[in-house]
Image (spheres, rainbow, N blue to C red):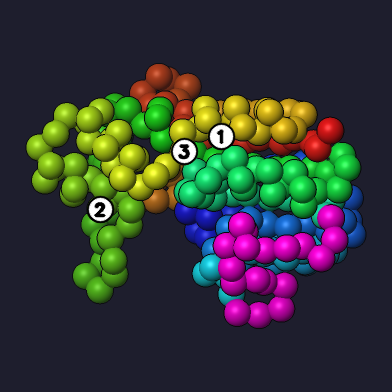
Amino acid sequence: MASDPRWLASVWPFVRAQLPPVPARVLEIGCGPLGGFVPALLGGGYDAVGVDPEAPNGPGYHRVEFEQYQPPAPVEGVVASTSLHHVADLDEVLDRVATALAPEGALVVVEWAWERFDEATARWCFARLAPPAPTAEPGWLNEYQQRWAASGQPWDAYCRAWAAAEGLHAGQAILAGLDERFDRRLCTDGPYFFPDLAGTTEADEQAAIDAGQVQATGIRYAGRLP
């Protein structure tokens, strides 16, 4: 998700609006193989780096886990887009974020609350999946749908077992950890799945949320280091 061009284009205005003015130093956690927001940050005049084991092999990127990266100096901004729910030790990562930030540095987080992924939301998503191309690997939602069907389990049991097996952190746990360390400036819920759905826009998913057809599983958070 973090590297999907539709996702990046949709989330970039929010990320940009929460960051300090250029030429601030900004670190992106989990930039992915496309570089995440680093190209847009560099193009906008920021001094930006991306940290991810699958980051591009080039200047401005560090191909390591964030837990193994030591910034040469404190940064004025940190961006984490759909990366925190995957980390092994959430508290360790958030402590490292706090250490990496300069005083009053900005933290921008875009996340997923998997615990809100109920059956009605899942069925709405699955009905909008395009068949995978013959030579392409199925997307995560296609694979998830197939595994649920094969399991024979009720949705709630399957979803929780899957999240436990993947070691996913719940959205509420992420927010609690953030609020322990940072001053919350903004936090909203909204769409998350639209980049993986055929013929579905962010506005379409928001309309379904507003109509009560699906849960708002996306989280957009902005905070400051005290």
| Residue 126 picture location, percent across and down | 27, 42
**Picture quarter containing residue 62?**
bottom right
Q: Identify the residue under disc 1.
A: 174
Specify the segment rendered in magenta.
Answer: 57-74
The percent coordinates of residue 1 (x first, y second) are: 47, 53
Residue at screen point 52% across, 69% down: 54
- The image quadrant of residue 139 is bottom left
Q: Determine crowd level at label 3: few under 14, some 14-19, many 20+ residues with C-alpha closer than 10 A.
A: many
Quadrant the C terminus occupies: top right
Disc 3 to disc 1, how far (Cα)?
7 Å
In this rendering, would 40 be left or right of 35?
Answer: right
Q: Which residue is mark 3?
A: 169
Q: Amino acid at mark 2?
A: Glu
In the rendered structure, which disc, 2 or 3, sits on the residue that comes first in sequence? 2
Mark 2 or mark 1, earlier in chain: 2
* CA separation in Å, label 2 and label 3: 20 Å
Q: Is residue 89 magenta?
A: no
44 displayed left or right of 13: right
Residue matched to label 2: 143
Element under label 1? helix
Indicate the secondary structure of the residue bearing disc 2: helix
Task: State the image coordinates of residue 197 (x, y, percent, origin top left).
Answer: 37, 48
Q: Amino acid at mark 1?
A: Ile
In the image, residue 39 lies at what x, y percent?
69, 67
Could you tell whether 21 is left or right of 101 in the image? right
Residue at left 73%, top 50%? Answer: 78
Q: Residue at x 61, y 32 (%)?
A: 177
* Residue nearest the viewer, comparing 67 with 7: 67
* Above/below status of 21 relative to 48: above
Q: Report the front residue among 132 and 177.
A: 177
